[in-house]
Amino acid sequence: MIPRIALTPGEPAGIGPDVTLAIAQHAWNAELVAICDPQLMRERAKILDLEVEIQVIDGPLGEPSPHQPGTLQVYPVNLTVPCKPGQPDPANASYVVYTLHAAVDACLAGRCNAMVTAPVQKSVINEAGIPFSGHTELLAEATDTRSVVMMLASKEMRVALATTHLPLRDVADAINADMLEDTLTILHRDLQSKFGLASPKIAVLGLNPHAGEGGHMGREELDIIIPVLEKLRDAGMQLQGPLPADTAFNPKVLSNCDAVLAMYHDQGLPTLKYTSFGEAVNVTLGLPVIRTSVDHGTALDLAGSGKADTGSLKSALRMAIDMSQSTQTS
C-alpha cells in the first residue's frame, strides 16, 4: 500500500519550506503532497540552490505512487504577501492556518492517509488576531475531538503526556481520575490501531518524588493514579506503575514497555530530547486522522541558509508512512 501524505511547510519565513524541499530530493515509499504556495517553494529552492521540479496539482488525484526524487507535488495555496526568509509577516498568518485546515480536510475525506506538519510561529499568528495555541488544539477543534494526547517518539522510546503546556503550579490540579483514564485509553487504543501493537505495555510515572512515598510526599498516587491503573488493569490493559520518575528512564524499564506516560511536560521529555534531539517525532493521538510533526521550531535565523537539519522531518515522515500502513493492515 502506497500512502499519500499531506505536508504543511508551516511558517513561510522559517525553515519549513527549506526542509520540505530538502526531503523532496530523496525517494520515499509514499506520495508527498505539499500544501503551500508554489511560488514560495520555487523562490526558496533557488535561494538554496536546489533543483526541485514544482508540480502544481490542478485536478483530482489518482492512485498514489511513490515520490520521485527532485520533484514536489504542490496543492496550491497563495501567500497573502510575498515572504522573505527569516522575516515573518502577520499578514500571512491566515495562509498558514488555511494550509492546516486543508491538510486535515484532505485526511478526513480520505484523499490523504496522514499529515505531517513543519513548525509554525505561534506569536505571529496571534499577532494577526487569530487565536492559536498550537497545532494540537487546532486539529482537535477541526475534527471535533474532545480529548487528544501528545506523544513524542524516537528510536529509543515513546513518551506521552498526561498534561502538556501548563505552569508547574497548575499540574497537580489538572490531574484527575477522568482525565487520566481518558489519556490512558487513548494511548492504549492508538498504540494498537496506529502502531500495530496488539497488547501494548505502558509504564506510568507518579506525579510526586518517589511516586509519593506511600503518601508522605503527596497523595495523588494513592487517591488518583493507583485507582485508575487498577481499574484499567481489570479491563485488560498492561500497565506498570506508578513508577518514580527519577529511575523510570533506565534500560530495564524501557525494554519492558512500549510507551511511558509522564504526568507533565518536563517530567517526561528531557530524557527523550537528550537522547534523540533533532530526530524525535511529535505525534497527536486521539484524532481521527494521523498527524506527526517535527520536534523543533521555525529557526528563523537559519531560513534560506541551507543549514537546517532535516532529521526530525524525515523521522516524522517515516513514522506517518509506517502508521498509515499499520492502520490499513490492522
Image (cartoon, rainbow, N blue to C red):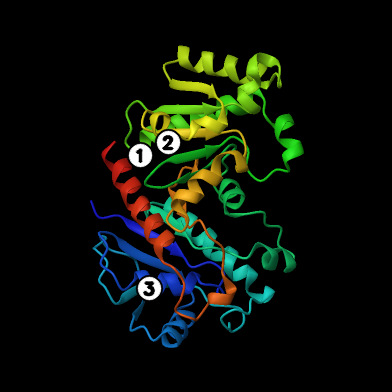
Determine the secondary structure under disc 3: helix
- In the depicted view, which residue is nearer to us: 300 or 94? 300
Q: Is residue 184 above or below residue 91?
A: above
Residue holding disc 1: 195
How dense is the environment of label 3, judged by Cα within 10 Å: few (below 14), some, or many (20 and up)? Answer: many
Which residue is at 56% across, 31% downward? Answer: 245
Q: Quadrant of the C terminus?
A: top left
Instruction: Tell me if label 2 and label 1 are in contact, CB under 8 Å.
Output: yes
Residue at 31% x, 48% y is 322
- Tag shown at residue 73: none
Three-letter amino acid code at disc 1?
Phe
Q: Earlier in the sequence, mark 3 or mark 2?
A: 3
- How crowded pointer 2 is (Cα within 10 Å; few <14, some 14-19, many 20+) is rated as many
Task: Give the structural element (helix, strand or loop) at label 1.
Answer: loop
- Whether the residues at callouts 1 and 3 have beta carbons within 8 Å, the answer is no
Question: Helix or strand or loop: what does disc 2 sit on?
Answer: helix
- Amino acid carrying label 2: it is Asp
Q: Name the mark nearer the viewer: 1 or 3.
A: 3
Q: Is residue 296 visible?
A: yes
Real-space CA distance between mark 2 and mark 1, rounded to the nearest whole angstrom: 7 Å
Marks 1 and 3 sit apart, C-alpha to C-alpha, by 27 Å
Q: Percent x, y for residue 138?
A: 60, 52
- Circle 3 is placed at which residue position? 22
Comparing 261 with 103, the one in front is 261
